[in-house]
Image (cartoon, rainbow, N blue to C red):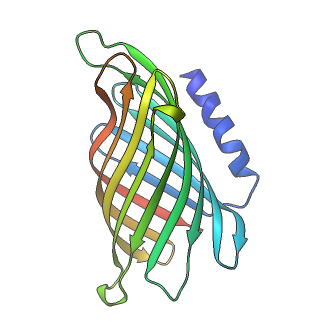
Amino acid sequence: MKKAFLLILWLFLPVSLVSAQGLAVQINNDSARFTYSTEAWGQQYGQLDLEGGFLYTQSDDYMFNLGLMVRNDSLDSPIIISIGTRMYYARVTGPAPALTNYSVAAVTIGVDALVIPDNMGGVGFGAHYFTGPSVVSFGDAEGFTEYGVRVTYQITPQANIYLGYQDIETKIKNLGTDVTISKGSLFGLDLRF
């Protein structure tokens, strides 16, 4: 656990050097995920967001991610789309009976989209998909995928809550099967400041 704490500090060091923009917390029956994001560079046609995250499961698996996302954030459009890359590192437990621990890493590309129609009173619909094939997967990984869907509700301009579903899995070399890091329904809180 000491290594995990030091890795968290290392992950958030570059993020803490820039002003904060957001904090997201996701929980389900088996895992908790914390993501911190900040605007690294603002542009007229979109901004570059830097994000760092940590996920921990009841089976003592954990995952870190660091990402750069270009986001269109316009008041004229009810659609917010972020496109970019995330780097993942995770320690996962393989299937029974062996329950072997595997270290996986991957560089992924993906998209995160959120639609908030003006006539729905703060209700929005979102989805995300990130994938990294074997050529950009390292350690024991032969591929890495994260995807999910969510329904959000804006409580205040700075706070959203959401319900959703997500699946984070990796394919393990020489195992021939996918190992799930986190899967299932979730509840989340997204704060912007």
Residue shown at 28%/41% (left/top)? 183
Which x, y percent locates residue 98?
Answer: 28, 9
Count of numbered badges drawn on the protein: 0
Name the quadrant containing residue 176. top left
Farthest top residue? 98
Residue shown at 71%/43% (left/top)? 13
Q: Which of 94 and 132 is in front in this view?
A: 132
Farthest left residue? 97
Farthest front residue? 135
Name the quadrant containing residue 71. bottom right
Which x, y percent locates residue 30?
Answer: 30, 36
From the viewer's perspective, tell me whether residue 13 is left or right of residue 56.
right
Q: Is residue 34 above or below residue 127?
A: above
Q: Is residue 159 above or below residue 100?
A: below
Location of the C terminus (image quadrant): bottom right
Q: In this view, does 93 lie above or below 130?
A: above
Q: Nearer the viewer, residue 33 or 141?
A: 141
Which x, y percent locates residue 151?
Answer: 30, 67
From the viewer's perspective, tell me whether residue 87 is left or right of residue 156.
right
Residue shown at 33%/53% (left/top)? 148
Which x, y percent locates residue 155?
Answer: 40, 75
Farthest right residue? 17
Q: Is residue 108 above or below residue 124?
A: above
